[in-house]
Image (cartoon, rainbow, N blue to C red):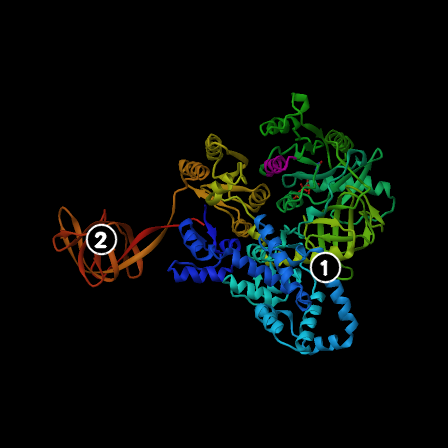
């Protein structure tokens, strides 16, 4: 025999938990409630009390149940016979281990027939019964607890009054719905909700709970265990439904795009590169030469993205130079870019932001096409660019690599067509496809509040076709697509895959990088949008789980982190290299270090963005974050580790990966001492005769010597004495002699502050 919980024992023996609890208390056995487990010995002792009565109890219960269900039978005088019959039946069901059965599951056909006859006969009685029922409109629960007594008394009693009363009760019970076979719930139910599902009065549930030792009110929420327990008391099955997160937008995107529905879609291209290398000039050139040329006289408008057509094929450009669009979106979890054009000025070569751009693109796994710009300049040296980029793994095809290099002049337009052709070529290789015949989803490129039009958002349709009137959820906003304008400023009715469009009709302004999904109906869109807005309000956006060294080991154990992405910033290139190569050599089973970006100089906002987008930590060696970067790191919860000694930085990372990070310490001041006199002893140095003003001082304390409010020295105690004896500790109100290691400039009137370093739990 194993352990049983009180309620399980009670159920097994057909008694109430309360009875078991009371008996256990009588037996001086500690028990807190119906969930308390009782062991074999106790079960045996209980069996001696309840076991014998088991059969009797069972018969009593069956009797009660029958009375509840078919009181009319008693009137007919068939009660006794039925009781016997049913007693036997219940006995069988018990032998089957079914426990308490719901009334509905037990009635014999005879009982049912009797009931039918009974009801009919009552109907015949017409209004008298009805009015009686009204008169005695007491709910069933008033009878139930005392049922046995009530019925017995009533049976004994004489007269039509009682007869009618019983008939009325029977009628009432007939009216009552039968117990359900099964109930379902999500997470929890209140007493009221459970009662409703079980077709019972809440007071009945409350009583049941009380018998199980639980005090509950009608609005009290019951957990899954309690719901199951109560339902099992009535023989009702329970099914807990897992709550679907209605705020998860991805869940609304059907993933059943079969290959046959997919057709080629235009690539989405971002232009990146160092300051002044010609990004804007290139974007402008493409737009003006291609767009306006196609749409003679058309007014191009800035909607954050535009499309051009080359040989009948379209290319979508994200019209935000620099990394801003790319990285902010990626930092927010959106992947929109298919191809990156890396612009490098041939007269300037690879510069810090070029490297950053390479690392951003690599981290996002986006193919790079190099546009070697400004080749029209006499000082242009494309070979040098190729040479320099090869150091970053971008090797030109002509040099045996697989990176496409196109020499261009964004100013004159030379080579730009070839560049666009290359974009189409890469796009073909990437096999970019989408299904235009489905509901659209995609990402917000830009959004703003327009005085006249309200919330205006530029969306990039990534799959499907967006149409006017579509019910839509965009980030935490929702609405119906009221109007759509394309990159040429024209009103359109629909927008297919890779098309940027500006829409109005949203209730609020979404954010760049937000996901949008089209819904079947406006009602669901509204519900989801509102639920998302509510959720966003509740949870601090910054709480997103970013990798942090303190939690790294746990995150690794949970399988959340398998690669530790690191950004290394240092004061000189030599340190960057030394630190990076040492970090890469760290060998911890099940995890590896992945240096995603390195650089010389302060930690900037761009580093934080990359860390956010790639879930990386930043190691700063002899450098500090800029004020803005620091603020951003705090809000984005990016872990920055600053070091001055290389091996310490490596140790820290290795320990974190092994789950052996040294404990963190916090300083705790334990006492204040006043220097009342000093003695100079040749071999020892200056001895300070002190008085412990506050707290205490211990032999192993750290000390700070303070003079006129200024910390003169910070160090360790060399000796702590009372009279001639070395002591471990001197408490408040006592005098002592103190010497400080390697420090003798102690003066009368100085204050010595004693502190210890206390280990604090890592969060
Ligand atoms: N000669 C020559 N000059 C160019 C070329 N492309 C750009 N420039 C010039 O280089 C300067 C910088 O160009 P931008 O397009 O503003 O460079 P950017 O990369 O967008 O610069 P930021 O927006 O500051 O990052 C401008 O004066 C351009 O006219 C080119 O192909 N040839």
Residue 353 visible in the snapshot: yes
Mark pair 2, 1: CA separation: 104 Å
What numbered label is drawn on residue 353? none
Looking at marks 2 and 1 on the same chain, the residue that comes earlier in the sequence is marked by 1
User: Residue at label 2?
Assistant: 745
Cβ of mark 1 under 8 A from ligand 1: no
* In the displayed structure image, the side of residue 599 where residue 251 appears, left or right: right
Q: Mark 2: few, some, or many residues within 10 Å (few <14, many ≥20)?
A: some
For the image, the number of numbered tags is 2
Q: Is residue 334 left or right of residue 311?
A: left
Quick check: is the Cβ at mark 2 less than 8 Å away from ligand 1? no
- Element on which disc 1 rests: helix
Q: Quadrant of ligand 1?
A: top right
| Residue 363 drawn in magenta | yes
- Please rate how many residues cluster around mark 1, counting C-alpha atoms within 10 Å: few if below 14, some from 14 to 19, many from 20: few
Tell me what residue is drawn at x 59 percent, y 30 percent.
Answer: 392
Q: Based on the displayed image, in which of its 4 quarters is residue 750 positioned? A: bottom left
What type of secondary structure mainly makes up the magenta span?
Answer: helix
Taking 423 as reference, is 747 above or below it?
below
Tell me: 650 left or right of 254: left
**Residue 328 screen position, x and y as percent:** 63, 46
Q: Which residues are magenta?
A: 353-365
Decide which of 103, 489 is in the foreground and name it: 103
State the image coordinates of residue 359 (x, y, percent, origin top left): 60, 36
Whether the magenta-drawn stretch holds residue 311 is answered as no
For disc 1, the marked residue is 112
Describe the element under mark 2 as helix, strand or loop: loop
């Amino acid at each position: 025999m194993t352990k049983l919980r009180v309620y399980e024992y009670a159920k097994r023996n057909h008694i109430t938990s309360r009875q078991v609890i009371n008996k256990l208390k009588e037996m001086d056995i500690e028990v807190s409630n119906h969930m308390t487990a009782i062991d074999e010995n106790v079960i045996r002792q209980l069996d001696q009390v309840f076991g014998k009565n088991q059969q009797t109890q069972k018969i009593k219960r069956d009797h009660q149940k029958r009375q509840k269900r078919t009181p009319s039978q008693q009137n007919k005088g068939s009660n006794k016979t039925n009781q016997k019959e049913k007693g036997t039946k219940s006995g069988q069901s018990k032998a089957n281990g079914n426990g308490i059965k719901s009334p509905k599951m037990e009635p014999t056909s005879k009982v049912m027939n009797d009931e039918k006859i009974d009801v009919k006969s009552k109907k015949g009685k017409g209004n008298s019964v009805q009015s009686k029922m009204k008169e005695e409109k007491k709910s069933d629960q008033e009878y139930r607890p005392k049922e046995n007594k009530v019925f017995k008394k009533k049976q004994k009693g004489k007269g039509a009054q009682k007869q009618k009363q019983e008939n009325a009760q029977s009628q009432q019970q007939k009216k009552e719905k039968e117990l359900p076979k099964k109930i379902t719930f999500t997470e929890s139910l209140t007493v009221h909700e459970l009662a409703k599902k079980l077709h019972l009065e809440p007071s009945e549930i409350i009583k049941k709970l009380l018998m199980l030792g639980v005090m509950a009110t009608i609005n009290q929420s019951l957990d899954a265990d309690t719901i199951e327990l109560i339902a099992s008391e009535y023989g009702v099955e329970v099914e807990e439904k897992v709550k679907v997160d209605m705020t998860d937008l991805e869940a609304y995107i059907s993933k059943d795009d079969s290959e046959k529905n997919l057709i080629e879609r235009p690539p989405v291209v971002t232009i990146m590169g160092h300051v002044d290398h010609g990004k804007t000039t290139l974007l402008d050139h493409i737009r003006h030469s291609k767009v306006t040329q196609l749409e003679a006289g058309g007014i191009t408008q800035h909607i954050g993205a535009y499309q051009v057509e080359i040989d009948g094929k379209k290319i979508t450009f994200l019209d935000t130079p620099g990394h801003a669009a790319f990285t902010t979106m990626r930092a927010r979890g959106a992947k929109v870019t298919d191809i990156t054009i890396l612009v490098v000025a041939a007269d300037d070569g690879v510069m810090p932001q070029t490297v950053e751009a390479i690392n951003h693109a690599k981290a996002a796994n986006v193919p790079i096409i190099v546009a070697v710009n400004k080749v029209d300049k006499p000082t242009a040296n494309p070979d040098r660019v190729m040479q320099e980029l090869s150091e970053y793994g971008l090797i030109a095809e002509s040099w045996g690599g697989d990176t496409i290099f196109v020499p261009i002049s964004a100013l004159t337009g030379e080579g730009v067509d070839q560049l666009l052709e290359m974009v189409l070529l890469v796009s073909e290789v990437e096999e970019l496809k989408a299904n235009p015949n489905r509901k659209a989803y995609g990402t917000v490129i830009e959004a703003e509040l327009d005085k006249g039009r309200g919330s205006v958002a530029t969306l990039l349709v990534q799959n499907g076709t967006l149409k006017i009137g579509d019910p839509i959820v965009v980030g935490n906003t929702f609405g119906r697509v009221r109007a759509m304008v394309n990159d040429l400023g024209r009103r359109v009715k629909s927008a297919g895959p890779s098309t940027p469009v500006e829409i109005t009709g949203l209730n609020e302004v979404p954010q760049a990088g937000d996901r949008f999904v089209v819904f079947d109906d406006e009602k669901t869109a509204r519900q989801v949008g509102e639920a998302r807005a509510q959720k966003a309000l509740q949870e601090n956006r910054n709480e997103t789980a970013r990798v942090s060294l303190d939690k790294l080991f746990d995150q690794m154990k949970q399988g959340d982190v398998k690669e530790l992405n690191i950004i290394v910033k240092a004061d000189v290139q030599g340190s960057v290299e030394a630190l990076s190569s040492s970090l890469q050599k760290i060998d911890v089973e099940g995890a590896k270090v992945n240096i995603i970006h390195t650089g010389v100089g302060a930690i900037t906002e761009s580093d934080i963005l990359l860390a956010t987008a790639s879930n990386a930590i930043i190691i700063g060696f002899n450098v500090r974050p800029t004020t803005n970067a620091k603020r951003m790191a705090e809000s984005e919860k990016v872990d920055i580790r600053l070091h001055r000694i290389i091996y310490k930085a490596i140790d820290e990372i290795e320990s974190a990966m092994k789950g052996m990070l040294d404990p963190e310490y916090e300083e705790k001041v334990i006492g204040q001492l006043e220097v009342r006199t000093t003695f100079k002893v040749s071999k020892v140095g200056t001895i300070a005769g002190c008085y412990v003003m506050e707290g205490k001082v211990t032999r192993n304390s750290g000390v700070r010597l303070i003079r006129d409010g200024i910390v003169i020295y910070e160090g360790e105690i060399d000796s702590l004495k009372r009279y001639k004896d070395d002591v471990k500790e001197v408490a408040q109100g006592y005098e002592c002699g103190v010497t400080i290691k390697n420090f003798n400039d102690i003066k009368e009137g100085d204050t010595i502050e004693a502190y210890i370093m206390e280990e604090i739990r890592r969060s």
